[in-house]
């Protein structure tokens, strides 16, 4: 950092982060969480997960593994592997607020979510050509699904199982129920 508190690009090289590789969730109920990611979000179980010495799964979208699951059941090897203890009964996502995925075909996604009776919220940003769906996984982690380039009229989704909607038009947020 320079004297003025800002990064000095001439003296400091930036880390070449290119994309999200994966995230790991420590699940209260490993099988229930696996089923959520498979059935509600449509991810596939990756068969190539090595035996790390504790129960878990890798889930993928297409060819890319993006979600790692581990059980919250007490496990010394898991705690050593993850460099911290995960006590039973932990709720929510700690420091993680939400995890976002790019998605396609919002109507198909909505039907899948409703089929599994999962509560969802949605937002429409027509000026930005962005539509979003928010839901919670079984461990209370917020999942955000971003549909880039989609303009959805929230009124067409009214009464279709959505808990709420927010529409941002020309800089003004409007809540709809």
Image (cartoon, grey):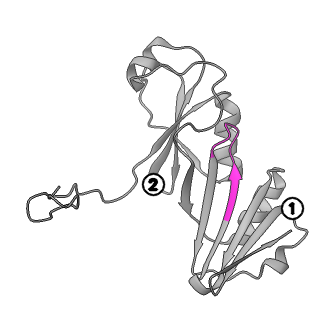
Q: Are marks 1 and 2 in contact (CB under 8 Å)?
A: no
Q: Which disc number belongs to residue 161?
A: 1
Image quadrant holding the C terminus, namely bottom right
| 53 sits to left or right of 135 | left
Residue 105 is a magenta residue: no
**Residue drawn at (63%, 26%), measured in percent from left and top?**
90
Q: Is residue 32 above or below residue 136?
A: above
| Residue closest to the far left | 11
Residue furthest to the front in view is 4
Q: Is 172 or 19 nearer to us in this picture? A: 172
Whole-percent x, y for residue 155 in the image = 84, 80
Which badge, 1 or 2, is on the more N-terminal residue? 2
Q: Position of residue 31 (x, y in %)?
A: 67, 31
Residue 163, quarter of the rendered image = bottom right
What's the magenta region? 133-141
Q: CA distance from mark 1 to mark 2?
A: 31 Å
Q: Secondary structure at mark 1?
A: loop
In the picture, measured across the screen, residue 71 lies left or right of residue 4, that is right
Q: Crowding at label 2, few (<14), some or many (≥20) Cα neighbours within 10 Å?
A: few
Residue occupying image coordinates x 47% and y 43%: 23
Apparent side of residue 53 relative to residue 167 in the rendered image (left or right) = left
Q: Give residue 85's mark.
A: none
Q: Residue at x 79, y 50 (%)?
A: 118
Query: What residue do we see at 39% from left, 18% from top?
Result: 80
Q: Which mark is residue 63?
A: 2
Q: Is residue 21 above or below residue 154?
A: above
How many residues crowd mark 1 within 10 Å: few (<14), some (14–19), many (20+)? some
Q: Position of residue 50 (x, y in %)?
A: 41, 29
The foreground one among 88 and 109 is 88
């Amino acid at each position: 950092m320079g004297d003025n508190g800002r990064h000095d690009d001439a003296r400091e090289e930036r880390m070449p982060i290119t994309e999200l590789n994966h995230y790991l969730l420590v699940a209260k109920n490993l099988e229930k969480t696996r089923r959520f990611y498979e059935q509600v979000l449509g991810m596939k179980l990756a068969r190539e997960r090595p035996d790390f010495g504790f129960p878990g799964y890798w889930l993928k979208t297409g060819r890319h593994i993006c979600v790692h699951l581990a059980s919250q059941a007490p496990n010394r090897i898991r705690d050593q592997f993850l460099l911290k203890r995960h006590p039973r009964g932990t709720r929510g996502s700690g420091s993680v607020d939400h995890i976002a995925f790019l998605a396609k075909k919002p109507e198909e996604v909505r039907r899948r979510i409703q089929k599994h009776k999962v509560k969802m919220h949605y937002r429409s940003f027509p000026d930005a050509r962005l539509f979003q769906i928010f839901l919670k996984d079984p461990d209370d982690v917020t999942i955000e699904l971003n549909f880039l380039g989609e303009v959805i009229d929230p009124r067409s989704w009214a009464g279709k199982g959505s808990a709420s909607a927010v529409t941002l038009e020309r800089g003004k947020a409007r809540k709809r129920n």
